[in-house]
Image (cartoon, rainbow, N blue to C red):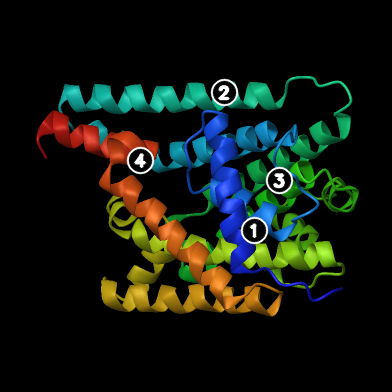
Amino acid sequence: MNNERIGLPDLAKETVNVTKELFVRGLRIRPSALTLVGLTAVFKGHFPIQDNSNIDFYVNMAQFQARTNDLLDIIPIAAESKDLPSGSFGVVRTHYQSIQRERRATLTRLREPEEGHEVRRAVVNNYMAEIALINRDERKKSEGTYYQGNVIAYRALENAVSLVNLSAIVLDHSELKARVLPKIEKRTTQAVKEKYNWILEGNPETSMERKLCALFNIVMGLQCCDDVLDLKHDSRLGLHTIATETLKMHDGDERKTRQTVAKIRDEYYKRARGLGATKAATSAINSTYKLVKLIMDAFPKRFGAPREKLLAELKTVEGL
């Protein structure tokens, strides 16, 4: 494997390229777009974003994943809304049904038959099956089984499966397709974990895999950042995240929670640097992510995710 570095100049350049390309396609910059920035920077020269037929497919994959997470985020609000006035319940129901429709439409686009893209469809089907299995096992757990390490392991596995499969499709790379196409023999989360153990543990065998391992650790660092920024919302809704479980561990002490999660985040960035990312690159993408999230929170009706838009509308309806 070579020692090519993942640096700030590449990230800065590709941020501009990705922003321009998504704007041309009529899409807003969202946190998921930063993964696309990472892919184009890490695999520069192998992944021309302009005229790349896989970009629209990537967007649909990212949208499907986002809508799935949006539904999971809104379910607790939907449960609470039964005790709210009828106006609020109607608002929640409208938002929930809208996300369901968007998710179904995205899934339909992903499964549309495409001549000459049979391998891509096979990758998508495997990805859907593995993510569904991970989420099914997660929903089966009782309340008492949740703890910080458990949530970190779940988030890491979900992010690893998503990143490797998205990369295999977007990069159209035979090596990665060979990694993800074999179906797991046993339909268990442990079997999925063993399949992706190389990226979870940071044991790459090729230059391509080393870069993906670096990007995975950056994604996990951003996961920690995201969970801390959403701590108040997630805690109120009873969601299980790295930050909310750490908050329980520290008996509700937010200061200690932020410090602990920051240490976990920094450890992921340290691993990324050991795999080829520069310190400037990890710092820059972390700051960019925080800026995007702060803008979304400051202007929820215009830039916010569905959960933030819903909470903002509920405040308007009920004057909360």
Q: CA distance from mark 1 to mark 4?
A: 26 Å
Q: Which residue is mark 4?
A: 304
Q: In what quadrant of the picture does the C terminus appear?
A: top left
Q: Residue at x 80, y 63 (%)?
A: 209
Q: CA distance from mark 2 to mark 4?
A: 21 Å
What type is the residue that disc 4 sits on?
Answer: Gly
- Locate residue 143: give its quadrant: bottom left
Q: Position of residue 111 (x, y in %)?
A: 72, 24
Which is nearer the eye, 33 or 159?
33
Instruction: Verify CB contact (< 8 Å) between mark 3 and mark 4.
Output: no
Task: Identify the mark nearer the N-term, 2 or 4.
Answer: 2
**Residue 104 numbered mark, or none:** 2
What is the secondary structure assignment of the residue under circle 3?
helix
The mark that comes first in sequence, 1 or 4, is: 1
Q: Is residue 154 visible?
A: no
* Of the image marks 3 and 1, the number of the one nearer the N terminus: 1
Provide the residue designation for mark 1: 157
* Count of residue discs: 4
Decide: marks 2, 1 in contact (CB < 8 A)? no
Mark 1 surroundings: few (<14), some (14-19) or many (≥20) residues within 10 A: many
SS class, disc 2: helix
Helix, strand or loop at disc 1? helix
Check contact, mark 2 vs mark 4: CB within 8 A: no
